[in-house]
Amino acid sequence: MNVIGIDAGATWIKAGLFSPELEIIKTVKTASGAGRGIKEYIDSIAAAVEKLGVSKVEAAGLALPATLTADGREVKYAGNIKGLTVGSRPVPVSHFVPGLLNPANVAVENDANCAALAEWQKRRGEGRPEIRLLHLTWGTGIGTGLVVDGKIQYGWEGGHLPVSWENPVPGACGCGSRVDLEARIAVPKLVSLARSKIEGLGDAKEAFKNILDQAEAGNLAAGEVIEEALLWMARGLLAMSIVAYPDLVAIGGAAMSRDWLLADLRRKAADEASGYLADALKPQTIWRANLGNEAGMMGAAILALEKS
Ligand SMILES: [Zn+2]
């Protein structure tokens, strides 16, 4: 059986061919047209599928950078796809499926949810239904997903959780908030904050890595930016955990790309917790996610198999 998973992001379209046991057979990557418009975006998805060279696709899953309706049939918001005005009038998910696939056979889901599901089933969660997994991807945005009893929970936009109404940041998050977690500590926000204090950080691709390098080398300004980011993340995780009570928290993405960041985040989570609900987030249950860039397409492939 040919199973494909597509992670159609704002910057890259990643597609993978999987065995029914979810072993990766082949992966491809192509530039996303999301910044140029909906037609270009769907054309890029089609190009990625064609590059896989599969003659007959039997099951397909598509991860979108979009918020879906609760029944999963329509897209409510997709701020990163240019020209797609949704909100008052949702768009059917079939609209995003390129012509070379049969929409009836394609499972469509939010990308952060796909990543959470893959991490639960194939990595940190070990596919054990008793493990409630809260998963975050901390990079350009902060994608969040919660898996309970092996199922993705609807909603769970933890990246857009307002963490403090004090001192709104100058630039709003994609959702419009100036006080949520993503507005405060998504990687581009940290880079722009660091640029106001440190010179020569390089282009957008290199800047965050340079901040981490400088923090490691003892640069005080770089260290402060990272320390403050980890403090906000610890607070955000505490707030999410009071309602989710996760057994496991897995965080991936550039902002969790080194071991010392995890150690520091755990310390802050322990320091910030208080009261009899402090056990909602046990620092030792926070881990770095294991799946990396493959998480979205693997989660899409898992959903494809469930649907087939
Ligand atoms: Zn937001």
Image: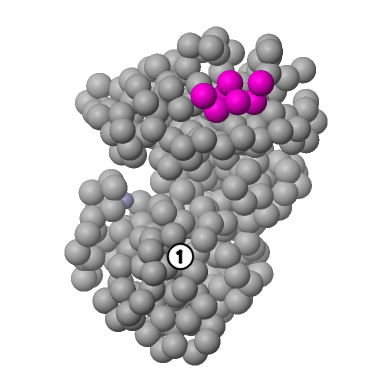
Residue 33 location (% of width, % of height): 39, 32
Find the magenta span and give its range: 47-53
What residue sits right under mark 1 in the picture? 206
| Mark 1 residue element | helix
Q: Is residue 89 left or right of residue 2?
A: left
Callout 1: 10 Å neighbours few (<14), some, many (20+)? few
Is the residue at mark 1 in contact range of ligand 1, meaning its CB lies under 8 Å from it?
A: no
> Is there any visible trace of residue 290 in the rendered image?
yes
- The image quadrant where one finds the N terminus is top right
Q: Is residue 38 left or right of residue 277?
A: left
User: On screen, 97 above or below 77?
Assistant: above
Q: What colour scheme does the image use? A: one colour
Q: Name the residue: 72% across, 29% down.
A: 18
Q: How many marks?
A: 1
Q: Name the residue: 63% across, 61% down.
A: 288
Q: Name the residue: 28% across, 53% down.
A: 173
> Is there any visible trace of residue 306 in the rendered image?
no
Front position in the image: 191 or 87: 191
Residue 31 location (% of width, % of height): 46, 37
Question: What's the residue type where badge 1 is placed?
Answer: Glu
Q: Is residue 277 left or right of residue 67?
A: right
Residue 163 location (% of width, % of height): 34, 63
- The image quadrant where one finds the C terminus is top right
